[in-house]
Structure formats: structure tokens, C-alpha cells
Image (spheres, helix red, strand yellow):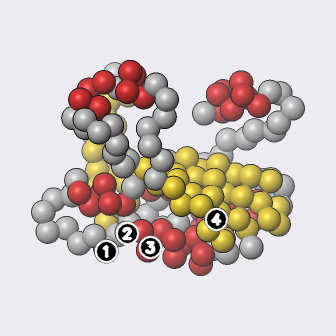
Amino acid sequence: MLALARQRLGDGVVLERAELGGPLPFADAGFDDVVASLVLHYLEDWTTALAELRRVLKPGGRLIGSVHHPFVSHLTAPPGTDYFATRSTSQWWELGGTKHLMTFWDRPLHAITDAFTAAGFRIDVISEPPPGPGARERFPEIFAQRESGTFLCFLFFVLTKT
């Protein structure tokens, strides 16, 4: 993602990578925007991560992010799973010839939005965007299962530091 952002934005924009497992190695109020794309759902508790993301944002700064769509997580859960419960789900992924156990934390929509507002963010945008241009050609096997070409996979959001 950083390489693509650098290609699109040029060298005049400072881009940094960080892990959300603890304190971020950045000064208070040092960033206009922070992007957390498909990362929060790997954390059981979002409290520390959201507090750190808010801390490094300037007043009025934005957190732009995405998570697994909670409704899709529920649809793929075992029968009888409580949508309103926060629960872990694990899957084996093969990356670079090595298998890794990936664990996600599924949350209902209200738990996601409550976490954002409790952390001191105003929710400006919640979006369920359609697939991007070229997606049908790049992933024909997925679209073959969905003739309409529509499906929900992710929930996108823009939050502002209050």
C-alpha cells in the first residue's frame, strides 16, 4: 500500500508504516491523516489502537479505514452464531509457501461505531462501495458466483478527531 501511495502522491508526501499492537513511535498531533486499511479486525480490543491513532492526529485530522463487513462475517459464521457478539474467527492462509493461522475479531456494526465514538472520533462516512473498475476482469471466479456483480466484503469509514 505504501508503494502504491508513493506512486500516486509523489515524494513530497511523508508516508509512514506502523504496527498497532502498542504505542505508536510518532509525536502527538503529527499527522493530518492516518490510514488503517483492513487492520483493526485483527485486534480483539480496539481501545489502545484507536487512542494511539487519535493521539498522533492533528486536531480535525482524519482516520480513514476499512474492516471486514460485519454482515458478511455473520453470513459466513456457523448457524446460530449471535450477530451481536464480538467473536474470533480463524482461517489458515498460505503466504509465500508457508501456512499461517490468521485470527480476526468479528463485531456487529454498533460495536464498531461505538468504539470509534468512544475513542473521540466523529463518524463522517460509512460506505459499502461496489467493486472497483477492472475487478470483474481481475477476479472472474468471484463474479461468476454473483451475476449482479454486487457483493459486500468490506466497510469503509472516514472519522474525524474531535
Kindly identify the amino acid type of the residue bearing the numbered disc 2.
Answer: Pro
Q: CA distance from mark 3 to mark 4?
A: 17 Å
Query: Looking at numbered disc 3 in the image, what kind of residue is underneath it?
Result: Ala
Task: For marks 1 and 4, give the CA distance.
Answer: 23 Å
Crowdedness near tag 2: few (<14), some (14–19) or many (≥20) residues, C-alpha within 10 Å: some
The C terminus lies in which quarter of the figure?
bottom right
Q: Element under label 4?
A: strand
| Disc 1 secondary structure class | loop
Circle 3 sits on which residue? 111
Q: Distance of mark 2 from mark 3, alpha carbons?
A: 5 Å
Above or below: residue 55 compared with residue 38: below
CA distance for labels 1 and 3: 8 Å
Whether tag 2 and tag 4 are in contact, CB under 8 A, the answer is no
Say which residue label 1 marks: 84
Q: Name which residue lies at 60% across and 75% down.
A: 117
Mark 4: few/some/many CA within 10 Å (<14, 14-19, 20+):
few
Which label belongs to residue 124?
4
